[in-house]
Amino acid sequence: MTDAPDNASDLLGELAAKLGAARGDTDPLEPLDLASRARLLRIARDVAHATERQNAPLAAYLIGRFVQDAIRSGVSQAGAIDQAASVVRSLIGESPD
């Protein structure tokens, strides 16, 4: 068994690297920067509070897939997260930030 990372940031960085390696990617996955991580966690919190809590991690997964596809098409990570946040707000009936 390997040593556990010291904090969540290390865990996410290590997870991104290992997932990329598992796929054989030469271009490794990049973990979210702190601002994007905070934004995604706020979105997940909003989903959990406005719907069944179990929807939060699944919404984060779907948003991650959306962000990945958006980045591949030339949208910035921040822009894609903003788009996802807007969609979530419209679904749960909240006004923009």
Image (tube, rainbow, N blue to C red):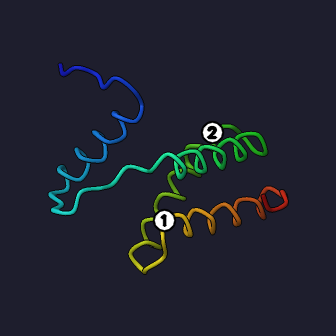
> What's the amino acid at mark 1?
Gln
User: Is residue 95 shown left or right of residue 78?
Assistant: right
Name which residue lies at 38% across and 75% down: 72
Up/down of 7 relative to 86, above or below: above
Residue 9: quadrant of the picture: top left
User: Is residue 1 shown left or right of residue 62?
Assistant: left
> What's the amino acid at mark 2?
Gln
Name which residue lies at 63% across and 65% down: 82
From the top left corner, tell me how far across and down residue 2 is, in percent.
Answer: 18, 22
Q: Toward the viewer: 93 or 3?
A: 3
Q: Residue furthest bottom?
A: 73
Quadrant of the snapshot with the C terminus = bottom right
Badge number at residue 77? 1
Q: Toward the viewer: 58 or 69?
A: 69
Name which residue lies at 53% across and 52% down: 36
Residue 30: quadrant of the picture: bottom left
